[in-house]
Image: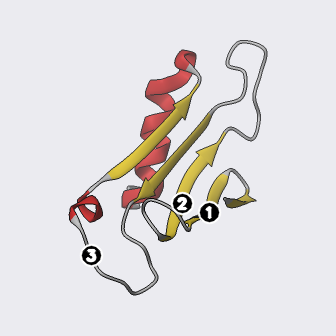
Amino acid sequence: MRLNNQQGRLVGCYSSKTGSVGAYPIIGFVDTKPDLLSRTTVALAIPWRSYLRGKGDSSWRWISLFVYNSLVEFILMYHFLKIIFHIV
């Protein structure tokens, strides 16, 4: 897995040679100014459709989400959805 953090927006890829073979995009969000109450918040999404050409399967319809920090989940998901869907 490789991730690039650009002002709190995470972009990268996950690649596998076993199981679901391929390379998959990762997008996400990380809190750039955590405080003592909220700790550091991270959210990642991986759509399971490889951007390398290959034979498709039913996993191409799935997206995995990872969110860390229960104190700010609502706010985090709002920002996360803004990034994904370009909501103003």
Q: Nearer the viewer, residue 20 or 38?
A: 20
Q: Residue at x 43, y 42 (%)?
A: 65
Instruction: Pinpoint residue 32: horizontal percent, then vertical percent.
Output: 74, 41
Tell me the element at label 1.
strand
Tell me the element at label 3.
loop
Q: Nearer the viewer, mark 2 or mark 3?
A: 3
Label pair 1/2, CB-CB below 8 angstroms: yes
Q: Residue at x 28, y 59 (%)?
A: 59
Three-letter residue code for mark 2: Ile
Tell me the element at label 2.
strand
Q: Earlier in the sequence, mark 2 or mark 3?
A: 2
Three-letter residue code for mark 3: Gly
Residue neighbourhood size for the residue with mark 3, other residues' Cα within 10 Å, grouped as few (<14), some (14–19), many (≥20): few
Q: Nearer the viewer, mark 1 or mark 3?
A: 3
Task: Give the residue at mark 3.
Answer: 56
Return the residue found at the far front.
18
Return the residue found at the far top.
37
Inter-mark Cα distance, 2 to 3: 19 Å
Inter-mark Cα distance, 1 to 3: 23 Å
Label pair 1/3, CB-CB below 8 angstroms: no
Q: Where, by quadrant of the figure, is residue 15 drawn?
A: bottom right
Mark linked to residue 26: 2
Q: Where, by quadrant of the figure, is residue 7 drawn?
A: bottom right
Instruction: Pinpoint residue 88: horizontal percent, then vertical percent.
Output: 41, 56
Residue neighbourhood size for the residue with mark 2, other residues' Cα within 10 Å, grouped as few (<14), some (14–19), many (≥20): many
Inter-mark Cα distance, 1 to 2: 6 Å
Q: Residue at x 42, y 73 (%)?
A: 50
Mark linked to residue 11: 1
